[in-house]
Image: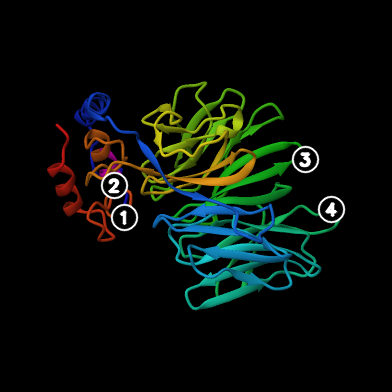
Amino acid sequence: MNAIARFNRSIWIAQLGVISVIAAATTAQQARFTVREIVTQPRGWGSTWHAKLLDDGTVVRSGSRDGVAVAQIGSAEPIEFPSFSTAWQWQANPLSVDHFFTLSGSPAGKAIARVTTVGTVVISLVPDLSAVSVQCVRADGWPVATWALPSPDAIGASVAFNEREVEELQAPAGVDSYKIYQIAPNGDEIARSFTSGSYVQYVRYNRASGAPPIALRIDGATSSYLTVGRFNRQGHALAAELISPKPGILVGTTVMPFAPEGSPIPYLLNDVEQATVRAGKGSNEPGLMEHGVAVSLLNDIDGLPSGTIQWGDAASLTNRGEILWRVTIDGAAKYLVLTPTSTIPGDVDRDGVVGGYDLEALIALWGTDSPAADVNEDATVDPRDLAMLLANWSL
């Protein structure tokens, strides 16, 4: 359901949003976030390990233990993948209850592991693959991976998995290589393709409909659009022109301005259209971009551990407003789980105030199962959630 198209977002909503900002500035006294958990390297694991955060608050770790690929979902017992030395989860998909890990370090090549509630399945790939990684997970719960052949003229391709087959996705005509980075709920793909060996082209391409690819940006080496994060439930993704930057959101095939030119580059996007700011691009501090404004969170976090903290990029931004942030503390790699302190029902963006921005976000997610606006947690954004939001209006 295209909720934005069904509701007329009139001027009064924008006015309510302005009022909400004023209210937040005058009434919010506590820090925006608190550190819920410090995620540390599990004992015996190698130094190269990764973590992701799910919408339900579960932390998923992946890496290597005693030379064997290993993954751990929450507090469950770690899962080992014999014959492989490293496991890596590229992206945690809140729409799927399954988990997918890239397995590497085997003489036979790489593979994909699918971990479900009933067991683990290792999906073997073509034996002569030289590189493979899960890039995203489709709305039906199955992963899409990019891969390359170990030959001088290898151009790369993509494979998708379902219960019946491994499917090779052919590159559009005139494209030397085609790697899928994101897939929207409607089947649209955001792909990075190379032409003439030096040009980068980001395309939006609906493979299911057979429509030709639509170029979002074609440039030389000096500038290109960067698409990062994942599609949210509105089918939007991030785009930022690296040369300026000019942060934007991909709405259909149009890049809509997301923040003023010169703003920091957004990195991860959630259903409320909040985005983390790339701390790894020289700022060395955590930031959040919302309502077209980038806000530093450095002085808005309670419970930070002692020691010298170096901030990297966020690893996850959930639809409940939690952030998993990569840091080093006195030289040791860790992750911090930052939890919003606001617990007001209807505070969709978790800024401590229920107002116009929350109403706008709820309308945009109407009819979906997004936990961002599912105030009563019944798996549907509907009139009951709207009623609870209005009942807790801050003014």
Element marked by disc 3: loop
**Kind of residue at badge 1:** Thr
Question: What residue does disc 1 label?
Answer: 368
- Report the residue at 77% width, 52% height from top: 155
**N-term-proximal mark, 2 vs 3:** 2
Q: How far apart, in angstroms, are the residues tagged by discs 4 and 3?
A: 12 Å
What residue occupies the far right of the structure in this picture?
A: 152
Rendering coords of residue 233 (x, y %): 39, 51
Whether pointer 4 and pointer 2 mark residues with C-beta atoms closer than 8 Å, the reply is no
**Kind of residue at badge 3:** Gly
Element marked by disc 1: loop
The quarter of the image holding the C terminus is top left
Element marked by disc 4: loop
Of the two numbered discs 3 and 1 in the rendering, the one whose residue sits closer to the viewer: 1
Left or right: where does residue 28 sit relative to residue 240?
Answer: left
**N-term-proximal mark, 4 vs 3:** 4
- Report the residue at 47% width, 48% height from top: 231
Element marked by disc 2: helix
Q: Is residue 361 magenta?
A: yes
Which span of residues is magenta-colored?
360-364
Question: What residue does disc 2 label?
Answer: 3
Rendering coords of residue 358 (x, y %): 26, 39
Rendering coords of residue 156 (x, y %): 73, 54
Q: Is residue 35 magenta?
A: no
The label number, if any, that marks residue 153 in the structure image: 4
Rendering coords of residue 247 (x, y %): 50, 30
